[in-house]
Image (tube, grey):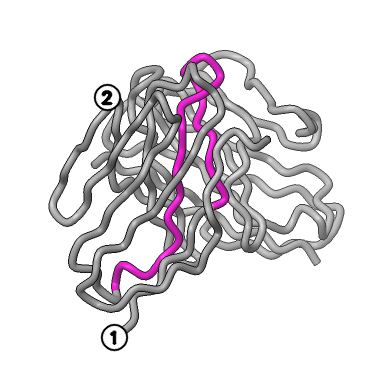
Amino acid sequence: QKEVEQNSGPLSVPEGAIASLNCTYSDRGSQSFFWYRQYSGKSPELIMSIYSNGDKEDGRFTAQLNKASQYVSLLIRDSQPSDSATYLCAALTGGGNKLTFGTGTQLKVEL
Amino acid sequence: GAVVSQHPSRVICKSGTSVKIECRSLDFQATTMFWYRQFPKQSLMLMATSNEGSKATYEQGVEKDKFLINHASLTLSTLTVTSAHPEDSSFYICSAREGSGRETQYFGPGTRLLVL
């Protein structure tokens, strides 16, 4: 079992819709979680971090964490074509010292 | 957010040569730097973790004698790919963290290596 799992997609949503990206993790000791966006040929850029159960909102982005279910999600409201990218979920593992990434979900926002 | 730079952004070399990649934190002191490798359509794989002034910790399966890491200062880490082979061609990305644990990692722009 992979430590961090994501559906590879592609996930296609129309412009203006809500995109929902999901991630599960296996290490119950993980306490910190991150969502990164990666455009093709570029390095990842941080979108959000979340450490506590519940929702965390930042602009059009909402991260959700459920530690009991070992589940993290990212909602993107009012999706734009510029949101089209691969979204990487990462968990702090190894006793909190290193990031373990999922394989990423490719999001396509269509006009 | 904090800025991390990498140099060079792209390098082409002949098989058997060595290539050095630099990673710099420009506006903060990075106690820990990480080196990742990403093959096409795959996720980032951590190669090694380096703390300033100490030896790097390599992930399982990563040859420490082939991928030499030096973290001589709080703002600079280098990765040297020794005796490069075509299978080493990849996207190498560094990240830097100011504190420990929960502190955010900031990624450099990456170095694309092509070994002919």
Quadrant of the image containing the N terminus of chain B = top left
Mark 1 or 2 closer to N-term?
Answer: 2
Quadrant of the image containing the C terminus of chain B = bottom right
| Left or right: B62 as drawn, with respect to B15 | left
Tell which subunit mark 1 falls on. A
Residue A7 image position (x, y, % from top left)? 53, 55
| Left or right: B16 as drawn, with respect to B56 | right
Residue B37 image position (x, y, % from top left)? 63, 47
Q: Are marks 1 and 2 in contact (CB under 8 Å)?
A: no
Which residue shows up at 21% across the image and 37% down it? Answer: A55
Q: Which residue is mark 2?
A: A52
Q: Which residue is mark 1?
A: A111
Q: Secondary structure at mark 1?
A: loop
Q: Secondary structure at mark 2?
A: loop
Tell which subunit mark 2 falls on. A
| Occupied quadrant, residue B42 | bottom right
Q: Which residues are magenta?
A: A82-103
Callout 2, which amino acid?
A: Ser
Give neighbour class at mark 2: few <14, some 14-19, many 20+ (Cα, 10 Å): some
